[in-house]
Image (tube, rainbow, N blue to C red):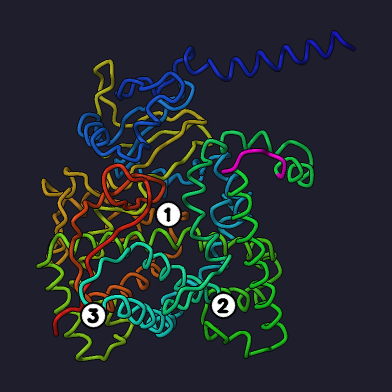
Amino acid sequence: MTQLLVLAVSLGALRLLWLLIRNYIVRTPVDRIPGPPSGSVFSGNVEQLLARDNAEWLTGFLDSYGPVAKINGFFGARWLHVYDPKALHSIYVKDQESYSRGPRTILTNTLLFGPGLLSTFGQKHRKQRKSLNPAFSAAHIRGLAPIFYRITGKLKVGLEARVINGLQEIDILAWMGRTALELVGQGMMGYSFDPLVEEVHNDFAEAVKAFVPTFAEVQWARALVPVTVKLGPASFRRFMLDRLPIKSIQRMKTISDVMHERSRQIYNEKKAAIEHGDRDVVHAVGEGKDMLSILLKENMKAADEDRLPDDELLAQLNTFIFAGVDTTSNAVSRILHLLCQHQDVQDNLRAELRAAIEHYGAEIPYDELTALPYLDAVCRETLRLFAPVNISIRQAWRDTMLPLLEPIHAIDGTIMTEVPVPKGTTVIANLPACNTNKAIWGEDARKWKPERWLKPLPPSVEEAHIPGIYANTMTFLAGGYACIGFKFSQLEMKSVLSMLVDNFKFELPEKPITWNFAGINYPSMGYTSPKPEMVLKVSFAVR
């Protein structure tokens, strides 16, 4: 028995050693693709690619290696870095079932959010998306406009109280975060996080705000997830987790617990109210127009085979909060920063909004608001040039081929019109790089020019057939795994901007503002501070 145990341990150790060194020994078809030298034996180019201040390295990398390149991953793994539109179409549309988010990401998302859209793949994902689609229809989004205007009205009161004594320096990122959380809370859950006109403490709100920065601290733990989920039943794993002496892990655990338990409480209260016809509860905050109310009603009417179980519906709440708060708040903050740098654009946008308000009133109707050309141009251009999410990661489930819009030169000098992708290969889709490809958008592709959307786009944009669902860009991804809530996000952005730019003038502070590369780009004050904040000078706009 002892000999068998020793043999088993030895074989296990050898297998682990082989897994760690095989990428340094075995050649793959990806080795034919040009790419930068590895920056580290352990992490390859990962630290260079994902560094908070990676702008200089990334620009040089994109200019040197183009739309398809090999980069070095952990332990010698070969990854593909892609922004060729034809290749992206294959990954996200034509051959989308050959790629997934990868087992580590799916398992991590399941542990944090439950079995929602970010944690499912294939048929299960399609079933969930089909059930969720009614809640994200244009008709239901339109019905949220009055709720959003009430929230932006409270934001106006909150900012006025701080500006009333003259020009003030205000952390706009913090206010945009509070506002986005309230928009998502009322619009998706029928729940109010923050009155905005006063400071209040809310455990749920604090947990949501802390989620993204804390998650960034524990990214390293994702590598251990596939192993830890096999360590016995969930009760045992929880027992071990509670005793793990790592502060960042314990913070992440607490945040996830708070979000899950409060979401469950809101979900159960809403479901019980709908089942028992309690209109007062259903209409208490979201007037019954919130996503959760619609999802519950549609799910109850669905046939048995189409109905989603409670745990999957509940998982969507945490998923929507994670995906919908920081992305939108940081995107609006980016627009306000750009308007400070381009006062002429801010003036033109204010003129358009005031003309619309004079015609329609302070609450511009949904269809008219979304159609305002200059506001739309500012939003499109900002989301093109500065997509809140930089990269999307996929992993090949089987051997496949990536077709290319433009051929590339292999290391051996041959021309490649398609790239072989071995099973297990990680593919990094660079969304901003596709959106700013000079071969598609022209020499001014990396310049912020809202006016480009007020005239026909270059023929090269149409000819590239970029597969994204929004404005010929990859900002909201493409295909069956594209962002289901992009119209919700658009209404958030435009309703907030219409109020802010009409009533306030924004100017740059003395201290420089730096935008940091992360899972979701965020601003900080100065070149060294990692703290998420963006202080602007705010005064009343002249009428």
Where does residue 491 sit, x and y in percent of width and height?
A: 36, 73
Q: Which residue is mark 3?
A: 503
Where does residue 197 sit, x and y in percent of width and height?
A: 41, 79
Give the residues drawn in magenta, as a range: 242-248
The mark lying in front, picked from 1 and 2, is 2
**Which amino acid type is shown beneath numbered disc 1?**
Gly
User: Residue at the right extreme?
Assistant: 1
Of residues 201 and 96, the one drawn nearer to the viewer in this rendering: 201
Mark 1, residues whose alpha carbon is within 10 Å: few (<14), some, or many (≥20)?
some
Which comes sooner in the sequence, label 3 or label 2? 2
Q: Is residue 392 above or below residue 481?
A: above
Q: Is residue 197 above or below residue 277?
A: above
Whole-number angstrom distance, CA of label 1 to CA of label 3:
39 Å
Which comes sooner in the sequence, label 1 or label 2? 2
Q: Which residue is mark 1?
A: 479
Q: Which residue is mark 2?
A: 294
In the image, taking residue 232 as reference, residue 90 lies left or right, namely left
Whole-number angstrom distance, CA of label 3 to CA of label 2:
34 Å
| Residue at x-position 26% and y-position 91% | 361
Of residues 362 and 421, the one drawn nearer to the viewer in this rendering: 362
Instruction: Tell me the element at label 3.
Output: helix
Q: Is residue 282 above or below residue 28?
A: below
Determine which quarter of the picture holds residue 353: bottom left
| Residue at x-position 36% and y-position 30% | 419
For the question of whether residue 300 can be seen, the reply is yes
| Residue at x-position 68% and y-position 36% | 228
Where does residue 523 sit, x and y in percent of width and height?
A: 31, 53
